[in-house]
Image (cartoon, helix red, strand yellow):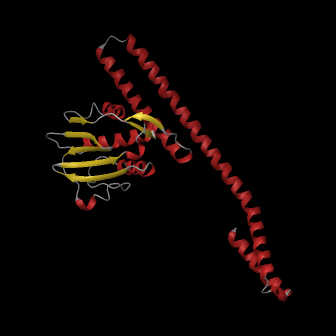
Amino acid sequence: MIFFLLLLILFLNSFLTVRFDFLQNSIVFIIFLSLLGSILFLIFSKKILKSLLTSDESLKNSIKNTLHELNIPTSTIKINTQLLKKSISDEKTLQRVERIEKANESLFELYKNMEYEFQKVLENIDKEEFCLLESINKTLDKFEDIKKDTKIDLNLKDISLYSDYKGFLIVLDNLISNAIKYNDKKNPYIKIELNENILSIFNKGEKIDAKNLMLVFDRFFQEDSSNIGHGIGLAVVKEYCDRNRVAININNIEDGVKISLNLKNIVKQA
C-alpha cells in the first residue's frame, strides 16, 4: 500500500510539474504533496488497521475464553478426588487417587503459568506485596518429592517484596529446580541465603564452563545437550529480572555454582 501511494505521489509530482512548471520549486507545492500523501495514507491505513485490531481483539478474547474453560475440568477433578478420598478405605486405591490429585495439581499449575504468560504479553501485571521466606518455602514444597537426599540450608531473614508475585515464584521454581537437577550426585547440597538484599542460591556440583557463563541465559542454550530440558528456564528468569530491574549474576565458586539476585529494587520500603 505504501509503495502504491509513493508511486501515486510521484506521478502527481511529475504531472503537476510538467503542467505547471512554475510550481516545480515551490515550498507550497511540496507541502501540498506531503499533506495529500498523508491524507491518502490515513484513509487507506485506517481500514486495514481497523480489521487488524478487530482480529487481534478477537484472538485475545478467544484465548481468555479458552483459558477459562481449561480451569473448569481441573476444578472438577479436584472436587471429585477429594470426595473419593473420603469414601475409599483400600490403601492401593487411595494411592492411585492421590496420584491423580497430584497430576491435576501439576496441570492446574501449568494453567496458571499459561494465564500468567498471556497477561504478561497482552495486559499489565499488577504488583503486590509478599514475603520472601514464604515464597521460598512454597517453591521448596513443590520439589519435596524430587529433592530426595538433597540437603537444603536456609540462611535468611524474612523481608517484604513488592513486585510481580507470580513471576517471582517462577524465578524461584526455575532456580531451585536447576539447583536440584545439576547437584552433586553423592552429596547433594543447596544453600539459600540473603545478605544485604542479595538473594543467592548455591548448589554443589559440576561448575559451568567459563566460556558459557554469559550464554546460560540465552533461550534454548544447553551446556550439555544430553540433559533433560529445553534450555528455557534461565531465559525466563532473565526476562523477569530485566523487567523488574533485578540484577542477576552467576558464578563458579568453590565446589559448585552460585546464582545471585539483587532484590533492592523490589524490596518493600517501610
Q: Residue furthest left?
A: 186
Q: Position of residue 143 (x, y in %)?
A: 30, 34
Say which residue appears at 68% left-offset and 49% top-offset: 54
Question: Relative to 247, is 252 on the left or the right?
Answer: left
* Quarter of the figure with residue 202: top left
Say which residue appears at 38% left-offset and 48% top-offset: 237
Question: Relative to 225, is 243 on the left or the right?
Answer: right
Note whether residue 83 is visible: yes
Q: Position of residue 111 (x, y in %)?
A: 47, 36
Judging depth in this view, the residue of 13 and 195 nearest the camera is 195
* Quarter of the figure with residue 46: bottom right
Note whether residue 231 is visible: no
Say which residue appears at 64% left-offset and 46% top-offset: 57
Q: Residue furthest right?
A: 19
Q: Position of residue 140 (x, y in %)?
A: 30, 33
Check the picture and name the quadrant holding the N terminus.
Answer: bottom right
Q: Is residue 37 above or below residue 26?
A: above
Q: Position of residue 37 (x, y in %)?
A: 75, 71
Judging depth in this view, the residue of 193 and 34 nearest the camera is 193
Check the picture and name the quadrant holding the C terminus.
Answer: top left
Q: Residue furthest front?
A: 270
Badge count: 0
Judging depth in this view, the residue of 152 and 28 nearest the camera is 28
Question: Relative to 255, is 16 on the left or the right?
Answer: right
Say which residue appears at 49% left-offset and 23% top-offset: 76
